Amino acid sequence: MGVDISSTGIKLVELGKTRHGYELKAMSVVPLPRDAIVENTVIDSMAVAQGLLDAIEMARPSTRNVAFVVSGNAVIIRTITIPTMTEFELEPQIEFEADQHIPYDIDDVYLDFQILGPAPDDDTQMEVVLAACKREVVEDYQLVLNEAGLTPKVVDCAVFALENAAELLADEIDVVSVPEAVVDEEDVQTYALVNIGANLININVLHDGKMAFVRDQFYGGNNLTEEIQKAHGIGYQAAEQMKLESFSSIKAEALESFYVGLTSELVRSLDFYAASHAEHPVQKIFLSGGTALVPGIAGELEQRLGIEARVLNPFSVIKADERKFDRDYLDRIGPMMMVPVGLALRSFDA
């Protein structure tokens, strides 16, 4: 099952596979105390372990094996170009290659790689994705999962889990892949998956269905909560309640300040991407995460960025037994479940 432990809560998803696609077997969403997780670091391990126990009790999954996710400053993802070789040949060399690109001592990180394929402009070279995360961060998450009786099997990066989930929605995203023989790339799509949580934005830009740029930025729904606090002169909990239960009562200046900040962060990332991919501008943005539940967010961002924006819901293509799961509830929370769905899909990796 996929377990996404974030600053605001725990999201758990277990999927099954049928002849007709995927089905939801178990799911739960459990809030965590404020500051139990800060900047993707476990601060209160007892609270997180208890939250996991509560999530398991609610969901009653059939397995204790989990894929969990890391993101933020502790994660480094780089695409490098090296001479073409097999995975077997690269394995013993990867630490040497990584040492030149990872800004931490190589002994202090967990490291993995994936060969993407030939470099676009040189058949003698190939592109490889390096992913590294600080050992202490991974081990802190492993510890709380073990305390809750769970067995970590996979550690993934949020941007990759997001991409996994998006593959389920290929028809909705309307991905067009151009055969290699076609020289004209006008039909090739470039789009951005943008997962906006409480404190963190995960961005994955894909060109022709392949990762072209990834980035995590610290901004999210908590910034809206802070703007509501300032505009209305109320405390954090009252502002959260207003955001969730009486959105129409929020003063316009609070929303405007939030959107100005959010747009600025997204433009910064899109500019970083464009600096090395000017010939393939982002044509569409697909939103997910808890902050994607903010009413009207797709329209606001589309207007401010000048790029088509839509909200994704993985449960639109995942079957669910309506005797166990409320379809209206699934549709309502679907956008915030993209990452745990992407993690759960790791069960079916070949």
Image (cartoon, rainbow, N blue to C red):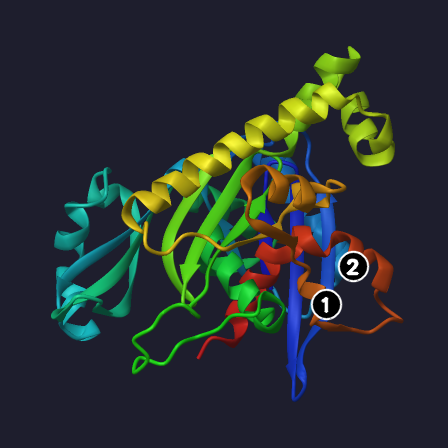
Identify which residue is drawn at 70% across, 72% down: 318
Look at 17% across and 66% down and name the residue there.
121
Between residue 313 and residue 33, name the one nearer to us: 313
Asked if residue 111 shows in the view, the reply is yes
Q: Quadrant of residue 183?
A: bottom left
| Quadrant assignment, res 128 | bottom left
Q: Seen from this angle, which residue lies furthest top?
A: 233
Amino acid type, mark 1 = Ser
Helix, strand or loop at label 2? It is helix
Q: Residue 31 at what x, y percent from top left? A: 72, 40
Locate the N terminus by quadrant. Answer: bottom right
Q: Which residue occupies the foreground of this view, 43 or 344?
A: 344
Query: Are the residues flagged by discs 2 and 1 in contact, CB closer than 8 Å?
Result: yes
Left or right, 103 with respect to 160, comes to left
Q: CA distance from mark 2 to mark 1?
A: 7 Å
Q: Amino acid at mark 2?
A: Asp
In this figure, which residue is indicated by the disc labeled 1? 316
Residue 254: % across, % down: 71, 21
Instruction: Work out whether 253 lies above or below 294.
Output: above
Q: Quadrant of the C terminus?
A: bottom left
Decide if residue 133 is in sight here: no
Please report the residue visible at 65 percent of the width from the left and 36 percent of the height from the top: 47
Q: Position of residue 296 (x, y in %)?
A: 74, 42
Determine whether the residue tagged by mark 1 lies in a helix, strand or loop: helix
Earlier along the polypeptide chain: callout 2 or callout 1? 1
Image location (x, y in percent) of residue 102: 23, 43
Q: Which residue is mark 2?
A: 331
Q: Which mark is residue 37?
A: none
Of residues 148 and 174, the one nearer the viewer is 174
Given the current orientation, which residue lies at the most extreme bottom position?
19
Residue at the image point whose x is 76% and y is 28% from the top: 240
